[in-house]
Image (spheres, grey):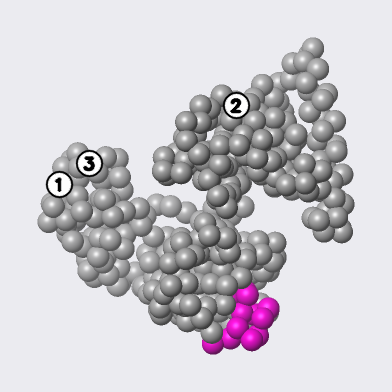
């Protein structure tokens, strides 16, 4: 059986844990500026219609008495790591898919922990005992059903879909609740007379592919309860990024580059902590009218130097023609390789040594910040902004 463990209103729950006065009150985690958005909302806030990704001003109109706090990513990551360590005590096959959710393969664990339901209850109890937070667990023979099951009885829920129950469950599952089916596809499938996943079962696969592309084949498999996805532990990230919605629209490139500098430092630190380097650097620019452009470039040599990432991001920004003011700026990296992965270097390329020197500076900064805090040492241009 596959388990999907999903922490309940994670960010908001951590804030309530650390601030007992918030208990029983609506709590919203998100940006406090006029451009801020909701990152998470407690269940008390959700009763007012507040949800993640909602503009903060709208959330406060719906729930003016809410307690609003800024996100504390370091704290959330710390709690998340504690949760993942608990899960690894039950099975070596744990796949973390986000900061607050993970899959667990319980194959071969029956003799140690009993039935799937007993094991799921033990997981919930251990998390509550050690981390003092609740989670919802879904259990099913396949991954996609486990994820659906974890959302059926929130918060603090437990739903088990046995092998015998799969056909009936799939048959009645609304198509909008199927992973990978977005609002646009829901409308397209509705026009074909498909309202549930069970309706797909008797629908010609070729017509499905014609209407939905390659996903049509996947949809056909799901309608039969087939999901060959396996739990993959310790899956390395494919990309790392950082972005910022600005407090006001601007066309000032010097100001935009200050944001890129901080983002390059954040992305570089994550690369170094993961013992990885990046081959490709990209930037994202969203204009005031919400039109978005992206630019990217592949480096001659992979890097984890914040300095190199920053200068490449600036070069990409300089090559953008900004006809309108900007509301969001972001940068990211992809093509990640492990540091100990062999890479062909250029013999007479002096930039290799420069990049190496900056990496040493960055690693020294990382150690100082980890020991004394991020504010103890930072770049002057960031401090001045």
x 68%, y 78%: residue: 18
Q: Give me the disc on residue 177.
A: none
Of the two numbered discs 2 and 3 in the rendering, the one whose residue sits closer to the viewer: 2
Q: Which residue is mark 1?
A: 204
Q: Mark 1 and mark 3 in contact? Answer it, CB < 8 Å.
A: no
x 74%, y 38%: residue: 306
Vertical arrangement, residue 31 with respect to residue 238, above or below: below
Residue 286, visible in the rendered structure: yes
Q: Residues within 10 Å of mark 2 (few under 14, many from 20)?
A: few
Of the two numbered discs 1 and 2 in the rendering, the one whose residue sits closer to the viewer: 2
Q: Residues within 10 Å of mark 3 (few under 14, many from 20)?
A: some
Q: Which residue is mark 3?
A: 209
Q: CA distance from mark 1 to mark 3?
A: 9 Å
Secondary structure mostly seen in magenta is helix
Q: CA distance from mark 1 to mark 2?
A: 51 Å
Residue 3, visible in the rendered structure: no
Secondary structure beneath dot 1 equals loop
Vertical arrangement, residue 164 with respect to residue 129, above or below: above
x 85%, y 30%: residue: 357
- In this picture, residue 160 sits left or right of residue 284: left
Q: Which residue is mark 2?
A: 318
Q: Mark 1 and mark 2 in contact? Answer it, CB < 8 Å.
A: no
Secondary structure beneath dot 3 equals helix
Mark 2 or mark 3, which has the lower sequence index?
A: 3
Mark 1 or mark 2, which has the lower sequence index?
A: 1
x 45%, y 39%: residue: 292
| Part of the protein shown in magenta | 12-24
Image coords of residue 112 (percent x, y): 59, 76
Instruction: Pick the quarter of the image with the N terminus.
Output: bottom left
Image coords of residue 250 (percent x, y): 56, 41
Number of marks in the rendered image: 3
- In this picture, residue 24 sits left or right of residue 292: right
């Amino acid at each position: 059986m596959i388990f999907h463990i999903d922490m309940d209103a994670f960010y908001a729950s951590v804030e309530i844990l650390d601030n007992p006065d918030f208990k029983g009150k609506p709590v919203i985690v998100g940006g406090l500026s006029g451009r801020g958005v909701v990152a998470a909302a407690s269940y008390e806030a959700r009763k007012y219609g507040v949800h993640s990704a909602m503009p903060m001003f709208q959330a406060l109109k719906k729930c003016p008495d809410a307690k609003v706090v800024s996100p504390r990513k370091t704290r959330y990551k710390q709690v998340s790591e504690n949760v993942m360590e608990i899960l690894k005590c039950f099975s070596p096959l744990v796949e973390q898919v986000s900061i607050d959710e993970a899959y667990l393969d319980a194959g071969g664990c029956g003799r140690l922990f009993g039935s799937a339901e007993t094991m799921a209850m033990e997981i919930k109890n251990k998390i509550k005992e050690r981390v003092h937070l609740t989670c919802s667990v879904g259990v099913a023979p396949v991954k996609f059903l486990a994820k659906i099951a974890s959302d059926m009885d929130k918060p603090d829920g437990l739903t088990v879909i046995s092998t015998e129950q799969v056909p009936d469950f799939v048959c009645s599952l609304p198509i909008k609740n199927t992973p990978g089916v977005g609002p646009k596809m829901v409308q397209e499938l509705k026009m074909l007379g498909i309202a549930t996943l069970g309706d797909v079962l008797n629908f010609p696969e070729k017509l499905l592919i014609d209407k939905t592309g390659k996903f049509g084949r996947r949809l056909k498999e799901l309608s039969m309860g087939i999901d060959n996805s396996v739990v993959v532990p310790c899956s390395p990230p494919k990309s790392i990024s950082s972005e910022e919605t600005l407090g006001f629209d601007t066309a000032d490139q010097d100001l935009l580059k200050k944001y890129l500098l901080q983002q390059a430092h954040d992305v570089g630190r994550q690369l170094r902590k993961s013992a990885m380097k990046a081959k490709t650097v990209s930037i994202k620019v969203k204009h005031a009218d919400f039109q978005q452009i992206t630019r990217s470039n592949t480096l001659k040599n992979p890097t984890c130097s914040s300095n190199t990432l920053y200068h490449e991001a600036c070069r990409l920004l300089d090559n953008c023609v900004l006809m309108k003011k900007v509301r969001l700026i972001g940068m990211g990296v992809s093509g990640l390789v492990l540091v100990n992965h062999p890479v062909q270097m250029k013999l007479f390329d002096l930039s290799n040594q420069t990049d190496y020197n900056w990496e040493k500076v960055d690693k020294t900064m990382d150690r100082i910040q980890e020991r004394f805090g991020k504010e103890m040492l930072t770049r002057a241009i960031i401090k001045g902004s």
